Image (cartoon, helix red, strand yellow):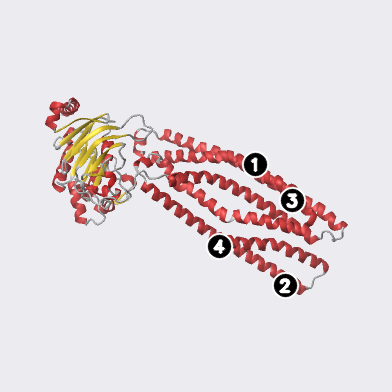
Amino acid sequence: MTFLFIVGEVIIECLIPFITARLVNNIQAGIEMDALVRTGLLLVLMAVVSLCCGAAAGYTSARASAGFAKNLRHDLFDRVQDFSFENIDRFSTASLVTRLTTDVTNVQFSFMMIIRTAVRSPLMFIFAVTMAYIMGGSLAMTFVVVIPVLFIGLFAIAKAAMPAFRRVFKKYDKLNESVEENVRAMRIVKGFSREEYEKVKFGQAAEDIRRDFTKAERIVALNTPLMRFCMYFNSVFVLTVGSRLVITSRGKVLDVGQMSAMLTYGMQILMSLMMISIIYVIITISLESMRRISEVLDERPSMNDPENPVMEVPDGSIDFEQVSFKYSAAAKRYALENVDLHIRSGMTVGVIGGTGSSKSTLVQLIPRLYDVTDGCVRVGGVDVRDYSVKVLRDNVAMVLQKNQLFSGTIKENLRWGNETATDEELVEACRLAQADGFVSSFPDGYDTYIEQGGTNVSGGQKQRLCIARALLKRPKVLILDDSTSAVDTRTDALIRAGLRDYIPETTKIIIAQRIASVQEADMIVILDNGRIDAVGTHDELLRSSEIYREIFEEQTHKEDGDE
């Protein structure tokens, strides 16, 4: 529709100078008033129709470009939702935010310019040049000089400005990253009095963008003087040569109407070239945005459902069979190596190890957040790669140390675990997770609004709400990845007791730093540098594992010292 409206607008705009030229000549020859009025009304009607076509083209192009941007953002967001952890690791959060916002906006604007101005300007150029030669004859030869000069100059300017525009987008990622880090870590920034440092860091990122934009805009600003030079040259040439031809030929070679039409067509031709150069700049800028968007859209999810996926998880048994894993094919060493571990359904398993021993990596293979490099992981006796990803993750609940709450009420956050959970079930899950006490103390109770990221609740409260959310799933496997680190030992013990009573048939894997958190587990796994060092109960490991004994003695002496 935009194209059709623009064609109508351009044709009428090119015909108006032609009719105006004839009117000028007729007035000079002595036109009757009735004919003058009819021609005047025709010009008014044509101007109104042209205006309506332009307005309609503006409406349809805006609607089309906004709809295009909506669809593009939708497809980008859908693609990101399908990403595995491996895919997400390739893009920073700030970069994805920039691609979904700034880059899509650039492409939206470019799309609107393409379907409107990029159609209008070439059409206007072709029609205006044609009409100029029809009306002006040899006088139109001025465009043989002006058009190449303007064309070459404008595109040279656009080409010179492109490198600076391209650099800006990568710097936008750094700027967004600075903002995101500062907002997320506001308490830490203030706690360490690093406000001035953050201001300087943000200022440097903003200054880098300003510098590149300034350089690009200075180059692009040369468009205006070049355009004015060509316009003035054309006007002076047409007026000088045209006036001479009108006078010397007494209107036989060129008359006053034709000369005035030449001035108008000259302006249309030069403005068309000006707009084409601007479109070139805009499209070239948006090409970088298009490339960045395409990187996300072209990224293939590393995990997909098999052709005939298993749609039911029989039980919570877990088997690691000679599992090795590294985060990328280019990695020099394995994060996990030769892991052989068998967990019966319903067992409580503790996982202990030093920082960097790959405890979190081990449990992330169970819900298939990553795929193993070698070997296989089985849940319920079935290779996790044979399950529907959704079915598997619905039956394996994970509570992370830094789990997230989303903006919304406490009820809405809890129902992430079970959309159909009743209020009574929410209260029961919170009671077992030792969250009901503090939730009930809020003025709005379970309708209390949680700010983005859960910034209006403490770390321990956030962890307990996340545990309650996981309990509502009634999963076959529950993984607590150091998710009680922010609560005291008494609350930790009450939570573990609640888990035993509420989901006795669920396999529970508890990653912890405190031995007290896993001391009563049916099995404790000791990890060291990505390998299983020892497996056994608390008493067995005290006798057989030097690592476990050192951790136990260190924590016991520390507690004695605290007392």
User: Is label 1 in contact with label 4 (beta carbons under 8 Å)?
Assistant: no
- Which residue does the numbered mark 3 point to in the structure image? 143
As drawn, 24 above or below 102: below
As drawn, 114 above or below 528: below
Residue 225, visible in the rendered structure: no
Q: Residue at x 34, y 41 (%)?
A: 85
How far apart marks 4 and 2 lie (CA) works out to: 31 Å
Give the mark nearest the N terminus, 3 or 4.
4
- Pointer 2 local density, CA inside 10 Å: few below 14, some 14–19, many at least 20: few
User: Is label 2 in contact with label 1 (beta carbons under 8 Å)?
Assistant: no
Kindly state the secondary structure of the residue where label 1 is placed. helix
- Pointer 4 local density, CA inside 10 Å: few below 14, some 14–19, many at least 20: few
Give the mark nearest the N terminus, 1 or 3.
3
Give the mark nearest the N terminus, 4 or 2.
4
- Pointer 1 local density, CA inside 10 Å: few below 14, some 14–19, many at least 20: some
Give the mark nearest the N terminus, 2 or 3.
2
The amino acid beneath tag 3 is Phe
Numbered mark located on residue 38 in the image:
2
How far apart marks 1 and 3 lie (CA) works out to: 19 Å
- Which of pointers 4 and 2 indicates the residue nearer the eye? 4
Residue 388 locus on image (x, y percent) = 29, 49
Residue 217 locus on image (x, y percent) = 59, 42
- Which residue does the numbered mark 4 point to in the structure image? 1
Residue 491 locus on image (x, y percent) = 17, 41
How far apart marks 3 and 4 lie (CA) works out to: 32 Å
Residue 123's quadrant in the figure? bottom right
Numbered mark located on residue 156 in the image:
1
Q: Is residue 112 left or right of residue 459?
A: right
Q: Is residue 135 left or right of residue 517?
A: right
- Which of pointers 2 and 3 indicates the residue nearer the eye? 3
